[in-house]
Image: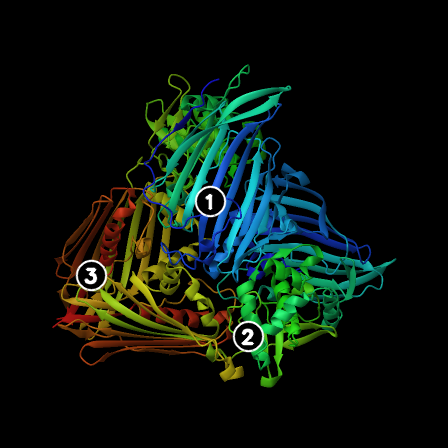
Amino acid sequence: MRAIGLLPAVLASLILTCAVHAQEASAIVRFYDGKFSMGSSKTGTFKVVAEIEVLGESGAPASVFVENTDSYISLSSFSGSVSYKGKVLTKITKSDLSVRSLSSGLAEDNLAYYYSPSAPYPYTVKYEYTMSYRKGVAFFPTFMPVSDEKVSIENATYSIEVPKGTEIQYYASQSSPSSETKGGTDTYIWKVSDFKGFVSEHQMPSALEMVPFVFAAPKDFMYGGTTGSQRTWNDVGKWLNSLQTSSDDLPEDFKATLKEMTRDCRTTFDKVSVLYKFLREKTRYVSIQYGIGGYVPFPASTVLSTGFGDCKALSNFLRSALAAVDVPSDYFILNTERKESLPGIVTFGLMNHVMLSVPLPERNDTLWVECTNPVYPLGYRHSGVAGHEVVLIGEGGGQVKTVPSYPDSLSRQSQKTVVTLDDKGGASISGHRDMYLDRAEPYIGFGELSTDAQIRRLTSAMKIHPDNVTVTGIGDNFGEYLEKGKDFCPHVWLDYTMSTTVYANADGSRIFLPFNPVAQGMTFQRGTRVNDLVITGGMSNEDVVEVKIPAGYKVESIPEPVELHTAWGDFVASASQKGSDTVLTKVSYTFRPARIPKENYDQFRSFARAVNRAFESKIVLARE
Amino acid sequence: MRRLTFFILLLTCATAFGQSISVNPKFGDISDAEVDMTTFSSDTSAAALILYSEETYNVTFDASLEILQTHSVHRRIKILKEAGRDYADFRVLYYTGKSLSESVSGIKVSTFNRDGDRISETKMDKKLVFTEPYSDGVNVVSFTAPEVRVGSVIDVYYEIKSLRYYKFDDVYLQQDIPVNMAVARYSMAEYFFAKGSMRGSYPVDVETEETESNISVSGRPVYFRTKSAIYTAKDLPAMSSEPLCYAPRQYRSAISYEMTRFVYPGMSPVNFNTTWSEVDVAVRESNIWTETRGKCRFADEVLALKDDGKNEKQLIADVRDLVLSKVEWDGTRKLVPRKSSEILKSKTGSAADINALTGSALKELGFEVEPLLIRRRSSGYLPEYLVSTDAFDLFILCITSPSGTQYYLDAARKEGYLNVLSDDFLVTNARLVHPEGPVGEWRDISELTTNQIIVSTEMNLGSDGLIEGKMVGRSYNQCSFALKESYGSYDSPDGFIEEEEQEENVEIIGLDFEGDDKFSAEAILSETFERECTKSGDMIYVNPFATKFHNRSSFRSEKRQTPIDLPYKYRVTYQAKINIPEGYQVEEMPSTLAYTCAPLNSRVQLSCTLSSENQISVTFVFLLGGRFAYAEDYPDIRAYWEQVCNIYEKVIVLKKS
């Protein structure tokens, strides 16, 4: 599906906000005025005048000009300047702007106009430009005058002027806009002043909490020669459905082939399995987004003849194929990065992906099928869709559903490592790793990777120098949905062997064993926390390491056990001697979704330090 | 007519072995064996394989003697695993500027799959070819193969036509997936003179052939010979990027070509740079020369810096500061500066602009300034037989003081100093252009300074196992550059400290950094820290290293294909004094040890001694005397590196007496 219409690409990566003092700001938006004027349901203009002062190098990104265009939106005028100490150094015209494709897929009609100013600090840039909308206005430009950290706002205004009586909807960071009616227009105005800026920190709340923004859209719209309504998701569904009337056009002979392929299938699930396998073997993901094609899937016949498509096309193709064998399914839209819809606004521009929902009446269940990556096991709701609000698109319109999520306790990984140590600190190692639910996702398709890529993925978190790494076994339970039904949780396991000359440090008459060489510690920040800490998803890990110590050595020192319990996480680590020749270490940790107030960040820091100290501790063996 | 001469350097022996799979190079002529193969025996983990690759450069002229270069590419790819399907997408970049205009045409893509007893062919619909702007003056043509599955064979062909008939991009025979057979062909009418070279460590077959050709000029036929040089390589393994290698592509098997002359009867010869002297002359006629050595527009301010009390280094530093007070570096690197009036007006400039202004300012004070052209290490080694002005990426200044001392300066970089440059610039063959006498000469600037880090640490160990320590580290020359660059990469000191804490497993109580805002060859980092030692019963286990200088991850991989390129030679001296608590004595201490590594010309040594009843002295010295090592030496280097990193794990055992 075309990338999110209302949200700038940068928002997807923004996860942090909070206020800083004005004197810490690296740039200041002195003035921003964005005015959208809707001439008709087909046309509009967005005029922007902005002035940004850049105080230092870290503030430079805030002064970069970037605007996206496509076959509906163009940059119709532009002028700008760069000043230093009140003197204009550079005048910028439209011909000074770079134009480049932002295509993340094979091809898109999105082009970016771009200018990066340069001058001694502090410098001021002014931009004045107009974006022209034609062939329809389905959503108004996003208002987000800052998207970089440590950028403050003195004054910013956003207004939407529409023909009188045109109903709009919006979701904004601040209270309702003021509005006025003058002549034949209604105008809605939002003002922001004295915004101090935000600071980036790890594991922070969503940017939408504190960055000033407005997402807005007309309730009724025209777009690409079509008309539609966004008053409800049902309306959105009707419009999207109307674009797909000619999408289900598989040739009859192919339909007959599908019927033959599924002739022996006795259940709906069996049919879906056969066609899902066909999808995996015969198609692949390629993204091509042009014009209204950004919202319309390629016809199923095109996917059949080319063997590729984007998420819309592949989902439509599978839907058509299932329909040919009398299995109904629903094409649905979703946002993979946000679970819940934004209140107060309904627009397809907020969605970024398409999948297929297939009811299984015989199992009282529904399959939520990822058609762009058919290596995921059927019956699994991956991390981009589990727990998300989605909109099923059908002839009756759009229907909002929530995809069932999984309990956090299922997201886990465990490792059992057996080490045979020699008296020089080297070791031969055999390991077994189990990964469940979303922890299994990076390992789906592991067997298809090159040997080098497998080794890198397997050993990336290890602190030892691995030699002779051999994956001796890979397995999964992907066929267990039939047995487990709704309780199905994907599980991938790996067995491997390796050796290393540097497992432990052998020095003189002692050997110093690492406590847990197969895992890494926690990240934390030492400075004063500015924002709350957010742990979004629960997970757990368990590592057991069994070390057979060399003959002639005894255990001289074992670290004390560590046990930490908080509202949001538990950590337990212990080491013990098992018999005379084996040392056993066990580490388990669990995190629960939580929001830790910034005032309590010290507790998180102390927790992380204690975890890291435990991981760095050593078991000491001494020669007998 | 003059005989065409191909001057081929580094001629290699005939092929040592044949390709694994026999292919017919004709487009679309796919064999059962190609379609039915499921794995590539020489590399069973390969996700895809290039069965055949042919790139041809054909330089011709038409009836009006307009010269055109056609670069055609034919590639046949076998998809062996699902991950290999990514090789079915193609993007072709081409220039759109007026003088450099190129066009892409003749695109053909077909996918071949096993379909029962026959091989089916699916052709790409030409409507699925997309053209978009890529960057300034460059467009991209994108297209993808249809019906691609595991097992598919894709044949793709396209042409790029260019008016830049004298320029040839390198043809890479070796890729990041295995190559069964690769061919590079250069065909030109006998009026064109060119020279080529090969690189890489796999044998390449070379053949030449001649054919008769003709065109009609003013209604009369003109006959000439077309001469072709054909390079063929077979069974090339995949070569990917590896760490500690500045330009991995330079080690792939590849062919480089350079046009030298075009001579047509009755016309003046068109010469391209054939000698470095000609390149030097071209530099002297460019802004590189005229702006660097031209009149300084702020001469009065420069002259005001003169002071009898200042030494020449101080004077150079002051001139640099003056230039940077007028012009901010915009972070870019260009080869040619703008006019000084333009630079000063805009108050911002590339590194070339800043170096040019600095050069012109220094000349006012009686310094001799010459531009030193550099091809960065990351751009690949510059073979001296490949003559071209395009060979260089940038220039810095070679300054000769009135006293005769010579310095090298890159004025834009705040981390640098005189003779202290980015490690990417430390090349063995930079080109110095003179104002008179021999126009230019090669300079080796790979080892301009002695680089070292000297760290002294004092640690007080408590009976509870807690160490309170203070460490002062002094970095000189290139080591200072690296430290300043690392420190400056963080938004705030906190970011730097967090990284240090997590790498060294310490809690840093205070940190002071001197040198990040000074133009100098030294940086000083001082830390006070706390660290917990392992304590068990009567024993305390103390690691004597407050910081580490080497990382195991540098040589983590078991195997290596490309040579190892290290930034610079350097020396580390670490000295620690550990005060042990009363009531404790040394139970065990690391013995004195020393290791060497001949391929790196490196050695390391450690000694721990009891300097008094309550104090242990630790001395660690590491010396790296080489910058380059061959891949064959990698196992020895890796083993040595492990020994070095093991030293950081050494433990002093104390026991309560």
Please tell me whether residue B73 is drawn above or below residue A25 in the rendered image: above
Three-letter residue code for mark 1: Ser
Q: Does residue B422 show up? A: no
Chain ID of residue with mark 3 = B
Judged by depth in the image, the label closer to the viewer, 3 or 2, is 2
Q: Are the residues flagged by discs 2 and 1 from a single subunit? A: no
Q: Nearer the viewer, residue A34 or A428?
A: A428
| Residue lying farthest to the right in this orientation | A183
| Left or right side of A385 for B288 | left
Question: How far from the left and from the top, in percent, is residue B162?
Answer: 57, 34
Q: Secondary structure at mark 2?
A: helix
Mark 2 vs mark 1, CA separation in Å: 39 Å
Do the residues under discs 3 and 1 have CB atoms within 8 angstroms? no
> Residue at left 15%, top 61%?
B589
Q: Secondary structure at mark 1?
A: strand
| Left or right side of A343 for A136 | right
Tell me the number on the disc at residue A273: 2
Please tell me whether residue B463 is drawn above or below residue B527 in the rendered image: below
| Left or right side of B526 for B142 | right
Q: Return the residue at label 1.
A: B53
| Residue lying farthest to the top in this orientation | B266
Question: How far from the left and from the top, in percent, is residue B63?
Answer: 62, 24
